[in-house]
Image: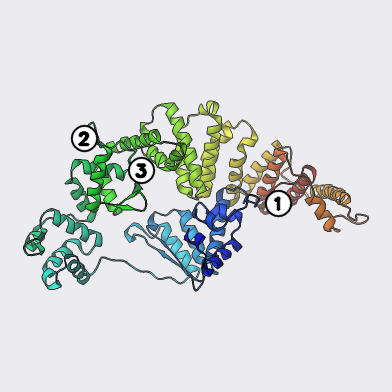
């Protein structure tokens, strides 16, 4: 946003550099990741927008435009540093993107810093696989292991915190280090617990901090920071505990406006009022459990705090709280825009409390929300969450819903197929396609999902099966092609194509007086083809797309079939008009 408003020469040059490589389609693709890009590059309504794609095409499109964007802004005078934390939770798509960007040779002023927890990443973890790929690509890298702070650093930190000379705090710092082994979070939480218990306190008469080293040494301390936090939260006021528990159900951070819409229960039948929860919230902020960040955001000070608070909820009660949060947010949304803003949160809460959905009409309503949330996630290139939302939505449907809620069922299962494809779950694609194949009312309704089946069969090397299924669909679309194409069959199609091209060239004013038209191919033939009208026959348009998807398999199985597909594609374009898949 600052770059968009800046008027200095360097900012203007940077904006021009971005505009030179990112067109209107690129802005559409990247705006989900960088909304401010629309302020930097203005899009005219007449600009051509990148056609809508799905599956791996959308992933590749995102990688391509993101690489172009970084290439435009990375210079020796303006290097770019990208830092991503908690890579141990990243999905394959995100790791693929990182690996692609790091391996780009033209990004010479680009530094990537990735952070992950070593104890949560084994040698078989995707992070390690991508780490190896980066090394094999010849990209220079450095491993930095972050351990607990050294004993001397712990001494210095405590001396600075208490504003006392190291010689006075040494025995106290030794005791703290012995209990925490230098884990920074453990150290800070341990100090806070000592203060709460009166073992560390400020003396007004002495005007300094005082501590009881012997009592600290004898004190039983939890083995890890999670246990310490759990113990600390358990000792809080019941209302503070309940607010932390319900907030933990919403994740590591949430908007205060979202939390305000949740009817937080404290005790058996008592709800926390808004003023009461504001006071408790401030106490938790002062205690270091929560922090206020940005505009109206509440964040747990560490994910260990959130985890500890969530673990205090009895397992049998968790689904009920998630379900109640989902209902509260959906019911208390003040407008469609606010509901859309909370959509992902609502769906994730319903998923965690899905066992409490018993009314079929309510299941249908949640299935619709899952569909909307999946599409929203896909538009942001969040493919793994999208696949989860779609899967949950399909699980809420019954077989009879294909009659009463046909459009919803078809769209959910189709989107599920596409999401399973883009995340590489090929078995999941086949499972999700089964109901579509069984219940679709016409062949056109199978179109989007069927293409993924053809692509997967080809990717798996099952070329013969891909051809079998593809030719069966072409037969239904009025473009029958036999399986065992011969050289003689190709010759027949060659003559048909030649006749159509001769006719097109004649209409375009080309010279077709002698010789074969394919041998005489000139600009008049090309112009005549490009002058063809737009194709409006949906069956022919789909047939062209199927032929194109079968090319790879045909190349592997039967070169005559490949040539036949190319001739029939060109014939369909000449007879019925041009589309995006015309040869």
Q: Which residue is mark 3?
A: 257
**Residue 6 relative to residue 571: left or right:** left
Q: Residue furthest front?
A: 7
Residue 267 badge: 2
Q: Residue at x 72, y 53 (%)?
A: 559
Residue 281 can be seen, yes or no: yes
**Residue 578 relative to residue 77: left or right:** right
Disc 3 or disc 1, which is closer to the eye? 3
Of callouts 2 and 1, the N-terminal one:
2
Q: How far across and how far down the image is residue 549, in percent? A: 65, 48
Tell me the CA gap for discs 2 and 1. 72 Å
Q: Nearer the viewer, residue 346 or 453?
A: 346
Tell me the CA gap for discs 3 and 1. 62 Å
Q: How many neighbours does mark 3 have within 10 angstroms: few (below 14), some (14-19), or many (20 or more)?
A: few
Disc 2 or disc 1, which is closer to the eye? 2
Q: How far across and how far down the image is residue 50, in percent? A: 62, 51
Render colour scheme: rainbow
Label 3 near label 2: C-beta < 8 Å? no
Q: Determine whether the residue tagged by mark 1 lies in a helix, strand or loop.
A: loop
Q: Residue at x 22, y 56 (%)?
A: 224
**Residue 556 relative to residue 177: left or right:** right
Q: Determine whether the residue tagged by mark 2 lies in a helix, strand or loop.
A: loop
Which quadrant holds residue 214? bottom left
Q: Which residue is mark 1?
A: 558
Q: Nearer the viewer, residue 528 or 460?
A: 528
Q: Determine whether the residue tagged by mark 3 lies in a helix, strand or loop.
A: helix
Tell me the CA gap for discs 2 and 3. 23 Å
Of callouts 3 and 1, the N-terminal one:
3
Label 1 near label 2: C-beta < 8 Å? no
Q: How far across and how far down the image is residue 532, in percent? A: 79, 47
Q: How many neighbours does mark 2 have within 10 angstroms: few (below 14), some (14-19), or many (20 or more)?
A: few
Label 1 near label 3: C-beta < 8 Å? no
């Amino acid at each position: 946003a600052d770059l968009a408003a800046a008027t200095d020469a360097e900012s203007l040059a940077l904006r021009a550099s971005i505009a030179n490589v990112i067109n209107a389609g690129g802005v559409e693709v990247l705006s989900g990741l960088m909304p401010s890009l629309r302020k930097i590059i203005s899009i005219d309504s007449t600009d051509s927008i990148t056609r809508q794609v799905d599956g791996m095409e959308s992933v590749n499109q995102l990688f391509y435009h993101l690489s172009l964007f970084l290439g435009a802004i990375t210079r020796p005078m303006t290097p770019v540093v990208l830092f991503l934390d908690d890579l141990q939770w990243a999905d394959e798509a995100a790791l693929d993107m990182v690996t692609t960007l790091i391996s780009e040779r033209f990004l010479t002023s680009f530094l990537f810093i990735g952070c992950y927890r070593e104890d949560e990443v084994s040698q078989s973890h995707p992070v390690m696989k991508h780490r190896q790929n980066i090394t094999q690509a010849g990209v220079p890298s450095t491993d930095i292991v972050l351990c607990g702070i050294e004993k001397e650093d712990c001494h210095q930190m405590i001396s600075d915190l208490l504003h006392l000379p190291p010689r006075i705090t040494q025995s106290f710092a030794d005791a703290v280090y012995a209990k925490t082994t230098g884990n920074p979070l453990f150290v800070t939480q341990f100090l806070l617990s000592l203060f709460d218990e009166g073992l560390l306190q400020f003396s007004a008469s002495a005007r300094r901090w005082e501590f009881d080293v012997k009592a600290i040494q004898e004190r039983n301390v939890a083995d890890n920071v999670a246990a310490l936090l759990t113990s600390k939260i358990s000792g809080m006021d019941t209302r503070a505990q309940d607010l932390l528990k319900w907030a933990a159900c919403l994740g590591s951070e949430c908007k205060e406006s979202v939390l305000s819409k949740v009817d937080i229960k404290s005790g058996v039948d008592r709800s926390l009022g808004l003023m009461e929860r504001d006071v408790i919230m401030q106490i938790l902020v002062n205690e270091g459990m929560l922090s206020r960040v940005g505009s109206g955001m509440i964040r747990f000070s560490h994910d260990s705090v959130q985890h500890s608070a969530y673990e205090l909820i009895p397992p049998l009660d968790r689904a009920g709280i998630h379900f109640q949060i989902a209902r509260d947010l959906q019911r208390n949304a003040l407008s469609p825009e606010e509901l859309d803003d909370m959509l992902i949160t609502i769906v994730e809460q319903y998923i965690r409390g899905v066992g409490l959905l018993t009314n079929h009409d309510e299941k249908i309503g949640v299935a619709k929300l899952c569909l909307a949330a999946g599409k929203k996630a896909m538009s942001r290139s969040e493919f793994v969450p999208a696949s989860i939302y779609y899967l949950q939505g399909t699980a809420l449907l019954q077989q009879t819903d294909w009659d009463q809620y046909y459009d919803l069922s078809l769209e959910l299962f189709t989107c599920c197929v596409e999401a399973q494809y883009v995340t590489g779950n090929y078995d999941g694609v086949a499972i999700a396609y089964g109901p579509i194949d069984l219940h679709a009312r016409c062949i056109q309704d199978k179109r989007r999902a069927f293409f993924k089946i053809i692509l997967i069969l080809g990717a798996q090397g099952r070329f013969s099966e891909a051809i079998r299924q593809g030719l069966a669909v072409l037969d239904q679309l009025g473009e029958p092609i036999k399986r065992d194409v011969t050289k003689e069959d190709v010759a027949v199609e060659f003559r048909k194509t030649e006749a159509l091209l001769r006719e097109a060239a004649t209409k375009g004013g080309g010279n077709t007086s002698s010789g074969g038209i394919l041998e005489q191919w000139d600009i008049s033939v090309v112009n005549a083809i490009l002058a063809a009208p737009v194709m409006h026959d949906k069956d022919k348009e789909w047939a062209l797309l199927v032929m194109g998807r079968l090319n790879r398999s045909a190349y592997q199985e039967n070169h005559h079939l490949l040539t036949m597909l190319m001739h029939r594609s060109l014939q369909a374009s000449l007879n019925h008009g041009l589309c995006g898949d015309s040869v």
